[in-house]
Amino acid sequence: MSDPLLVEAEPYPYGFDPGHTALLVIDMQRDFVEPGGFGESLGNDVTMLQKVVPPLREVLAATRSAGVTVVHTREGHLPDLSDCPPAKLSRGAPSMRIGDPGPYGRILIRGEYGHDIIDELAPAEGELVIDKPGKGAFYATGLDETLRGMDVRSLVVTGVTTEVCVHTTVREANDRGYECLVLSDCVGSYFPQFQRHGLDMIAAQGGIFGWVAPSGHYLKALEARSAR
Ligand code: C5J
């Protein structure tokens, strides 16, 4: 194995081997990021999530150029809602429920326009897209088996929202033995305080769930590798 690349991070440098790493892009779907979707139906300001798009585009481009595996996820449900627990359907008394007609089709239903990933971050041909019914990317998806099959051990985590699907996924990944680096400007929350505390919680206690760094530090490590 070659020397790991080092990313300046909290709580200490994060080492990863690009050949055993995947970039996870979590739920950058129209239903969360664009006006009129599920996120907004819950009363959220979607511009808070749109900030993530420019740095994430850069990360995606550099990751692809470096030949690192990219995995996208989408939260959503089957058209008959058989994979959506009743508690999830009614939670939060949204103005529109999962499965209701919205401006981009039925809210959070697989195959609908709103369920899909925003154009700016569209998956490239051959990139994995994992459809998940829960908040965590490992629950009921087969993601763990897929990553193990590719000998992936490290995850660079991006997407939305920081305190919900990103956090749940990082916790699930940590319990399964993956080393997670969360890129602070490539994850987003509708709530500034959740963004701050969500990131703090990952790197606290010596990196209880993983590492946190701005995307520039990750890009620098990839650039240093191409200069080797
Ligand atoms: C939420 C997500 N917030 N992708 N989903 O319901 O974080």
Image: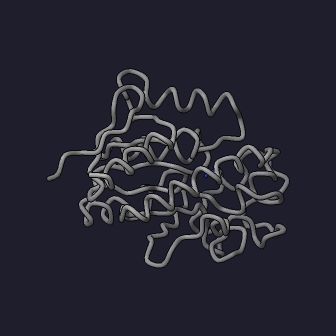
Pick the residue in front: 31 or 59: 59
Colour mapping: one colour
Q: Residue at x 33, y 42 (%)?
A: 175
Above-or-below relation of 148 to 167:
below
Above-or-below relation of 176 to 61:
above
Measured as percent of width and height from the top left, residue 22 is found at 37, 57
Measured as percent of width and height from the top left, residue 144 is found at 33, 58
Q: Dividing the picture into quarters, in which one does residue 11 lie?
A: top left
Measured as percent of width and height from the top left, residue 147 is found at 32, 61
Left or right, 200 with reference to 178 = right
Q: Residue at x 37, y 61 (%)?
A: 66
Pick the residue in front: 175 or 227: 227
Q: Residue at x 68, y 64 (%)?
A: 108
Left or right, 115 with reference to 92 = left
Q: Residue at x 71, y 51 (%)?
A: 50
Pick the residue in front: 9 or 146: 9
Measured as percent of width and height from the top left, residue 46 is found at 77, 49
Q: Residue furthest top?
A: 205
Above-or-below relation of 28 to 170:
below
Q: Residue furthest left?
A: 1
Number of marks in the image? 0
Left or right, 63 with reference to 101 = left
Left or right, 8 with reference to 121 = left
Pick the residue in front: 223 or 47: 223
